[in-house]
């Protein structure tokens, strides 16, 4: 791929021919691999992916990725990761439950495996903006204290700490705090199905701010952080939409030519929606993204959800 067509532009020669390991190579991981040029065949870098499913190895190879069979829930299967990669993208989510509830044993297992031999130069961990808890619609910078309100977010905080601990051993660790991921070509990646079901959203007076990132831009942010991220630094991987949740669904409905969703009070929503859906309506914040644009020098292809959903 010519340097002028590479998603991040030309890279210095000393950064070429790297071995990049993707842990958690689902939809976003495959997009990271594409952004790295895994299928270009030019050999600038080798892209590897950890998979717990042997049946996925063929599909990964077809995408230009070298598969490694291993399971984060079975640490003994991770031995071959030691000293293998020069850079790591950690996209694997914590387990749905753990003992204790706030623990992410997967990130701990990965960190231990990577420490056994030569450490990677850099590691990017995709966390969640949910680590801040409810911020009552305030603007939130990466320096804000973490106050996770759910066990799901607490496990992410635990994972961040495990990665930072690895960073103190000599790895340049960057943490991306990620909001809602969307993309028209991602399974469940748009509000269309929810709009077709007629699921309600909160009335304007009780609505919450929500944040978004297109899956392709998230992948590009991961690649940028691998080479440009500062050590032990957190970044908000978010666009500049600045929308409340109901306005986001209204915008999508208008773009798709569908009826706008009904508006209900929070009390009514408690009777109509699942606890998980309600949990996303209980936190409101707006993410400051200056570090993403200034330090990682990333210009989003989809600066707001309007461009991303329309695309």
Image (cartoon, rainbow, N blue to C red):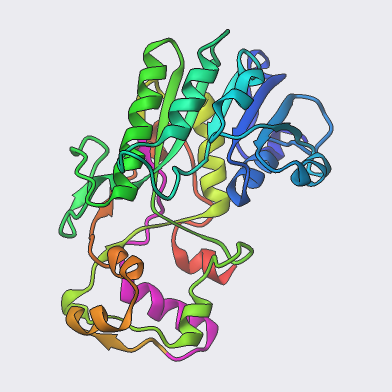
Which residue is rendered at x = 38% and y = 35% of the image? 294
User: Which stretch did the figure color magenta?
Assistant: 234-259
Q: Is residue 44 above or below residue 285?
A: above
Task: Say if residue 283 shows up in the picture.
Answer: yes
Quadrant where the C terminus is found in the figure: bottom right
Which residue is rendered at x = 39% and y = 81% of the image? 250
Q: Is residue 33 left or right of residue 173?
A: right
Task: Say if residue 229 shows up in the picture.
Answer: no
Q: Is residue 34 left or right of residue 175?
A: right
Quadrant where the N terminus is found in the figure: top right
**Outermost top residue:** 118
Q: Nearer the viewer, residue 244 or 1?
A: 244
Number of marks: 0
Which of the 4 image quadrants contains residue 78? top right
Q: Position of residue 282 (x, y in %)?
A: 23, 64
Q: Is residue 169 left or right of residue 280?
A: right
Which residue is rendered at x = 22% and y = 51% of the image? 149
Q: Position of residue 237 (x, y in %)?
A: 42, 45
Q: Is residue 182 above or below residue 60?
A: below
Q: Is residue 144 left or right of residue 166?
A: left
Residue 145 lies in magenta, yes or no? Answer: no
**Outermost bottom residue:** 259
Q: Position of residue 297 (x, y in %)?
A: 46, 35
Which residue is rendered at x = 50% and y = 89% of the image? 258
Q: Position of residue 60 (x, y in %)?
A: 76, 42
Q: Nearer the viewer, residue 267 or 305?
A: 267
């Amino acid at each position: 791929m010519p340097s002028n067509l590479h998603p991040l532009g030309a890279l210095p020669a000393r950064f070429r021919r790297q071995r990049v390991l993707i842990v958690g190579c689902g939809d976003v991981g495959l997009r990271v691999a594409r952004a790295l040029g895994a299928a270009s065949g030019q050999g600038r870098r080798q892209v590897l992916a950890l998979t717990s499913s042997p049946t996925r190895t063929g599909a990964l190879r077809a995408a230009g990725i070298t598969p490694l069979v291993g399971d984060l829930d079975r640490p003994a299967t991770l031995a071959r990761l030691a000293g293998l990669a020069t850079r790591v993208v950690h996209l694997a989510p914590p387990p749905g439950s753990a003992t204790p509830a706030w623990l992410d044993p997967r990130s701990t297992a990965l960190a231990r495996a990577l420490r056994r031999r030569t450490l990677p130069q850099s590691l990017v961990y995709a966390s969640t903006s949910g680590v801040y808890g409810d911020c009552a619609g305030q603007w939130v910078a990466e320096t804000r204290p973490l106050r996770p309100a759910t066990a799901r977010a607490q496990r992410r905080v635990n994972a961040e700490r495990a990665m930072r601990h690895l960073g103190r051993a000599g790895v340049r660790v960057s943490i991306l705090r990620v909001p809602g991921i969307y993309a028209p070509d991602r399974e469940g990646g748009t509000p269309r199905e929810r709009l077709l079901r007629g699921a309600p959203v909160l009335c304007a007076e009780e609505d919450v701010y929500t944040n978004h990132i297109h899956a392709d831009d998230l992948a590009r942010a991961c690649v940028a952080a691998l080479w440009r991220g500062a050590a032990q630094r957190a970044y908000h991987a978010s666009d500049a939409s600045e929308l409340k949740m109901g306005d986001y669904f209204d915008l999508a409905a208008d773009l798709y030519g569908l009826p706008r969703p009904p508006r209900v009070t929070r009390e009514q929503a408690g009777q109509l929606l699942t606890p998980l859906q309600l949990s996303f309506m209980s936190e409101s914040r707006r993410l400051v993204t200056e570090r993403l644009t200034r330090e990682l020098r990333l210009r989003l292809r989809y600066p707001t959800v309007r461009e991303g959903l329309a695309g």
